[in-house]
Image (spheres, rainbow, N blue to C red):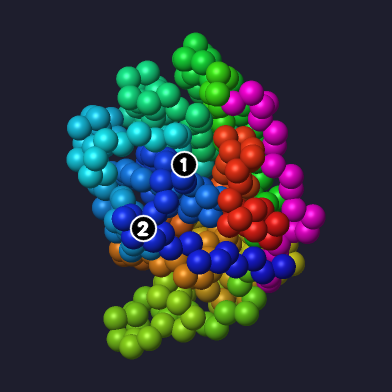
Amino acid sequence: MRIISGNFMSKDRKDLKRAKPLVLSLFCGCGGLDLGFEQAGFEVGLAYDLRAPAIESYNYNRATNSGFVRDVGRIKFADLDSDFGREFVPKGVIGGPPCQSFSRGNSSKTEDDPRRAMVRVFFSLALKIHRSRSELDFIVMENVPEVASAEEGKLLQTEINRLERAGFRVSKHIYNAKNYGVAQNRRRLILVALNRSRLAREWIIPPVTEDLCTVRDAIGNLKEPVYFEDAKKADTYPEHPNHWCMTPRSSKFFNNQLKPGRSTGRSFKSLAWDKPSYTVSYGHREVHVHPRCNRRLSVFEAMRLQGFPDEFVLKGTMSAQFSQVSEAVPPPLAKAIALRIFQSISPEDVSDASAKIAAE
């Protein structure tokens, strides 16, 4: 069940219909969460991230150049208006604050890690807009499940209390991307805050897909990638500009130690053809191995396992590209969440395009 999204490119801003609900994206990365919201009928008017390669990718895939390199903690209303070109009045705020300090895979996390404060920074700016600029219909935050653990959950509950005092009805659930058409076993917490005075409906979890998408469905039809040493010499890449990977050097690739669907030691995780992938994550020395066990995955293969459409291109170094894809929200999961919200704020006016997407 290979799922390929349709054309996601935004039109020139001057041609966009203002009827589309306007959204602000914080800690946007390369734009996986944003892509899902765009596919569901929203317009992401502004998007911010501190990492230049991520914003380069974000803007490369959109005609509006709505992504900006900024420190989210320092954004002011004047910045929003200047970057947008006029007063910026969003209907919602979405984002995924850095999660490495919460992640189970981070063995070096500490109490004073500044990334722990980014969840509060995210909600603080959203609530500042809600109180002082425009009453928001919704706020959506994505993060790792550990953000709601016994220790970290105190931080999250403080933010939930702030949202509830500001008039939002808050729901948080753990979603697995494999249940939404993604060839990957990826569990993520998604918090949805809906304005009680404007949206009467309770949050309803989006229905899951009937069939699981496997590694074979996602990458089984791809040719061999270009290896890093040959990348600069190659006139064209097979399949896609991101279809490249590191040249296999470890003895594990050559001595039959690696078996499909099994982990070897701390780092090597070999994928099985007929199951969803392990969580796409390339930090902390993890090496995700192609099911043939002869090499690592390419960036493009990782993108397909995340559910990105084939038209999407990542920019930057190979390391930057792997970071972008591993930190992204799978677009099909984002779209499922966004469609639920779109139908809540526009129950009688779901556009033909969004209705078509919902039926796919």
Q: Residue at x 49, y 81 (%)?
A: 239
Q: Is residue 16 left or right of residue 42?
A: left
Q: How far across and down, in percent of the image, does residue 94 sit? A: 45, 38
Residue for badge 1: 21
Q: Is residue 235 above or below residue 282?
A: below
In percent of width and height, residue 187 lies at 62, 43
Query: Does the image show residue 138?
Result: yes
The amino acid pointed to by label 1 is: Pro
Position of 204 relative to 324 (above/below): above
Does residue 18 appear left or right of residue 339 in this picture?
Answer: left
Q: Magenta region, mostly helix, strand or loop? A: loop
Mark 1 and mark 2 residues within 8 Å of each other at the beta carbon: no
Which comes sooner in the sequence, label 1 or label 2?
A: 2
Q: Which residues are magenta?
A: 199-217
Q: Residue at x 47, y 15 (%)?
A: 166
What SS does tag 2 mark? Answer: helix
Residue 208 among magenta residues: yes
Residue 133 appears left or right of 5? left
Q: Which of the pair 351/196 is nearer the observer?
A: 351
Q: Position of residue 89 (x, y in %)?
A: 35, 34
Q: In the image, is 212 to the left or to the right of 24?
A: right
CA–CA distance between discs 1 and 2? Answer: 15 Å
| Quarter the N terminus occupies | bottom right
In the rendered image, which quarter is residue 274 located in?
bottom right
Q: Residue at x 70, y 33 (%)?
A: 204
The image quadrant where one finds the C terminus is bottom right
Q: Secondary structure at mark 1?
A: loop
Observer able to see residue 299: no
Residue receiving disc 2: 15
- The amino acid beneath tag 2 is Asp
Residue 31 in picture, x, y percent from top left: 42, 52
Residue 4: assigned label: none
